[in-house]
Image: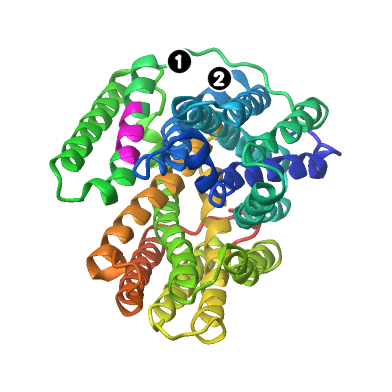
Amino acid sequence: MSAPSPRRWAALALIATAQFIVIMDTSIIGVALPRIQQDLGFSQENLSWVFNAYVVAFGGLLLLGGRLSDLFGARRLFSAGWLVLLAGSLLAGIAPEVWAELTGRAVQGVGAALIAPSALTLLMTLFGHDPRELTRALALYGAAAPAGGTAGVFLGGVITEYLSWPWVFYINIPIALVALAATGPLMPAAPARRGSIDVLGTLTVTLGLGTAVYAIVRAPEAGWASAQTWITLAVAMLLLAAFVAVQARRREPLMRLSIFRTPNLAAANLTQLLLGGAWIPMWFFLNLYLQQVLGYSAFPSGAALVPMTVLIMIGMIVVAPRAIGRFGPKPTTVTGLLLLTAGMAWLSLISPDGSFAADVLPASLVAALGMSLAFIPSLGTAISSARPEEGGLASGIVNTSYQVGSALGLAAMTAVASANGADRLGDLPALTGGFSAAFVGAAAIALAGALIAAAALRTRTGELTGSRS
């Protein structure tokens, strides 16, 4: 084994920055959307696609990003991702019309799909020599995600108010330039491996995942019972079935199906899928409760989420690594998911005349602690279960699992909330009832994740901790 890089912690800062930016780009546009709509002429129905174009491209191309990372080297793909993100950000900022704006956002999503799996592969390469260092590195990487989400809310508001909305995209450009300059000196090089790109597999899985995400994010608007929703979902399922058939027959598939027979990999990915399916709806509906029921404006609402974000970061950096070292990844994951379940069940008790101190703060802190404990060990287990030469693929799979789980969970809980009154704006009891139902549903998803993790995750010697857990 080669000696660890003396610059690995500086490299980790760049990897964490990549995670920060990828997540920030999903939230930074929120406050800017009304200005974008006014300047570019978006209809109310199409405005959500400023967000969705990024998510569809990101979620649909993650597996390809992982495969390309394995074939061409993670450092090359990491740099390529920043270049693509830079180009997309420039296009989104200068866009004169709706189509150009949506194209720019989609290109940003493509860049994120190249950055995310290659960043995780680089992290594993830099810190895989020491399980304890790996756990700390994963903790810092994981903490960058909630930091990016919260920072996006604040930066979006400040930039839109004091500069102009194109700067919510332009902010990526100097960061990308610095990342490109630092990647060569900091990141380990990996030789390109011989192999082919499974074009048919890439098309079927990308179109399948993209179509599925499209159907999911479109369903609340089109209606879950509509023919459009079900036909689109059926097309997605056919494309994904075709992908599985292609993978089973290809000599060099995009995704080796037998990888899921690797102990813990399938279970850890399913855990990540359910974790995303529980956490994102909770964050989304908590924000709506603060604004639409308690009457908070955008900035106070963002400030109200800061304690939760700070606890997540502390939990991921300080608490989770110690828990993994003492108890092992499986008990830590299960405990985290149970705490997340309890926090969201507590949030379901919100009332129309509630308050932040009584209805939101304590329950959100319990949920945040649960998230911080569950995320790091399940992520690390998913990545470390694969063979080293398939690190990019494993990174792509686990990123895909979390993103698809997030989209599925949010769409499903949106339907649950609407069915229970959340679509009746101005009716505070109805809104509260709808949001409460969404919290109950999200708690059920987290509980399912805890049960699956308890039943399916195996405890393995040396996994993440370097000691028997």
The residue under label 1 is 197
User: Where residue 110 sits in the image (x, y, percent)?
Assistant: 52, 28
User: Where residue 363 sits in the image (x, y, percent)?
Assistant: 50, 79
In the rendering, which numbered label is found on residue 35?
none
Residue 95 visible to an observer of this rendering: yes
Q: Is residue 6 or residue 85 the one in the foreground?
A: 85
CB under 8 Å between callouts 2 and 1?
A: yes
Q: Is residue 424 or residue 335 the one in the foreground?
A: 424
Q: Residue at x 68, y 36 (%)?
A: 172
Q: Residue at x 81, y 36 (%)?
A: 3
Using the rendered view, name the quadrant where residue 213 is placed: top left
| Label 2, label 1: how far apart the Cα atoms are | 8 Å
Q: How many marks?
A: 2
State whether the magenta stretch is mostly helix, strand or loop.
helix
User: Where residue 314 sits in the image (x, y, percent)?
Assistant: 69, 67
Q: Residues within 10 Å of mark 1 (few under 14, many from 20)?
A: some
The residue under label 2 is 71
User: Where residue 370 sits in the image (x, y, percent)?
Assistant: 53, 70
Residues shaded magenta: 207-214
Q: Is residue 227 left or right of residue 105?
A: left
Q: Is residue 435 or residue 347 the one in the foreground?
A: 435
What's under tag 2, amino acid-wise? Leu
